[in-house]
Image (cartoon, rainbow, N blue to C red):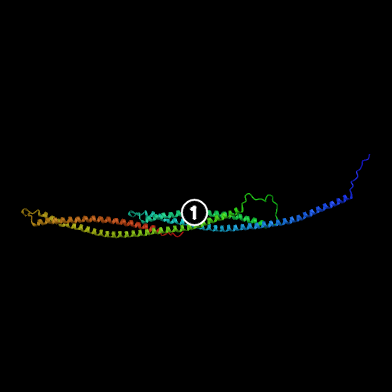
Amino acid sequence: MAKLVQAPQRFTHPEWTTSNLTKYANAEVERAAAERLIAESDRLSDERKKRTEKTQRDVKKKLQQRLDDIRYWKKELDDKLDGIKKEIESLLAFKTRIEKAIESCSEPLHIAKQCLASREKRLGIDLVHDDVQKELIKEVETIEGVMALLQRTLEQANEQIRLNRKAKYLLEKDLKDKFAAQSIDEYCENLKNNSAGLMLQEGVAKIENNSVSPEDWQDFSNENIENAERERQASVELRSLVDGVLQSTANDMTKQMNEVNLAFDKRIKETKDTKGKLEDHLNKILAQIKDMEVNIARLQKEIADKEAPLKLAHTRLGTRTTRPNVELCRDPVQYRLIQEVGEIEESIAHLQASLDSAEVSLKGLVRNQLDLEEDIRIKSNTLFVDEVECMGMRKSMNIQSF
C-alpha cells in the first residue's frame, strides 16, 4: 500500500502579512537597539578616552609634584651636605692644631725635666729646694696637665669627626637614593603612549609591602637633615671650645715659663751677689793670712832675738858664781842680772803666747779660706748649672699660640 505524503501547512494571507509586519518590527527594534548601542559605545569610548587622558595628565602632574618634592629635599640635603663637609674640614684643621700643640709640649716638658735633673748636680748647701725648684716642678705639672687636657680634647674632636662623617654618610646615601628616584620618575614622566619598550606587566598594580608613606619619606630626610645640623652645631661649639683651650693652655704654659725664668734670674743674681761677697771676704782673708804670716815671722824673730840676751845674762850669772870667797857677794849686779833673766823669760813667754795665738788664728784664717774657696766653687758650679746649662736650654723654649 503506498505511503501517504503530508501536505505542507498552508497559511492565510493575513498570517503572511502579520509575519512580515512582525519581522519588520523585530528588525526595527534590533536596528534601533544597535544604533543606541553604537551611540553608547561612541559616548563611552569618548568618555573613557577623556578619562584616561585626564588620568594620565593627573599622573603626570603628580609625577611633576613628586619630582618637585624630590628636588626640594635634594637641595636641602645638598645644602646640609655642603655645610657638614666644610665643618669636617674645619674640625680636621683644628684636630691638626691640637696634635701640633701636643707635639710642641714635648720640648718644653723635656727642658723642664732636664733642668730639674741638671739642678741635682748642685753641691753642698746650694742643693736647696728654692723657688726655682718649686716653679720648675710646677712647670712640669702645668705642661703635663696641658698635655692631658689636649689629649682629652683630641679624643673629643676625633669622636665629633666620626659623628660628622656618619651624618655626611647618611646625607650622601639619602641623596644617592633620591637621585635614583628622580631619574626613575623623570623617565616615567617622559614616557608616552607611543614610547618604545612599553609592555604589560602582571602584578605591578599594587602597593609594595616595604613601601613607606609620604610622611615617613619626608620625616626620614628631615631627620637626616636635623641630625646633620645638630652634629654641625656641636662641631662648631667644639671648635670654639678647642680654640679657647688652645689659647688658655698656651697662656698657662707661657705664664709658668716666665715665672720659672724670673725665678732663675732672681736666683742667679742672688748667687752671683753671694759669690761676689764670698770672693770679697776671701780676698780679705787672704790679705789677713798674709799679714798674720808676717806677724808670726816677726814674733818668731823676736823670740829668737831674745835668746842671745838670755844667754848673755845666764852666762854672766854662771860666771859670777865662780867669784872666790867673800867676793861671792849679793851685790846689785847679781840682783839686776837675776831681774834681767826674769824680764827676758817673761818677754819670751808673752811673745810665745802671742805666737801661739797667731798660729791658732792663722789656722782659723786658713780654714775660713778653704771654706770660702769651697763655697765659691759650689756657687760657681751652681751658676754654671743655672745660668749656663738650664737657662741655655730655656732660651730655646718658644711657646706661641697653638
What residue do we see at 34% from left, 59% from top? 270
Name the residue carrying label 1: 156
Q: Crowding at label 1, few (<14), some or many (≥20) Cα neighbours within 10 Å?
A: some
Q: Which one is nearer the viewer's eye here, 183 or 346?
A: 183
Decide if residue 210 is on the left or right side of residue 87: right
Q: Which one is nearer the viewer's eye here, 185 or 311?
A: 185
Quarter of the image for residue 77 reads bottom right
Residue 399 x %, y %: 44, 59
Decide if residue 181 is on the left or right side of residue 139: right
Label 1 element class: helix
Residue farthest to the front, as pictured: 14
Total numbered labels: 1
Q: Which one is nearer the viewer's eye here, 372 or 347?
A: 372
Evaluate whether residue 388 shows in this view. Answer: yes
Residue farthest to the left, as pictured: 326
Residue 57 x %, y %: 68, 58
Indicate the quadrant containing the N terminus: top left, top right, bottom left or bottom right.
top right
Q: Which one is nearer the viewer's eye here, 11 or 112?
A: 11
Residue 103 x %, y %: 46, 56
Decide if residue 36 is on the left or right side of residue 85: right
Q: Amino acid at mark 1?
A: Gln
Evaluate whether residue 195 shows in this view. Answer: no
Quarter of the image for residue 147 reads bottom left
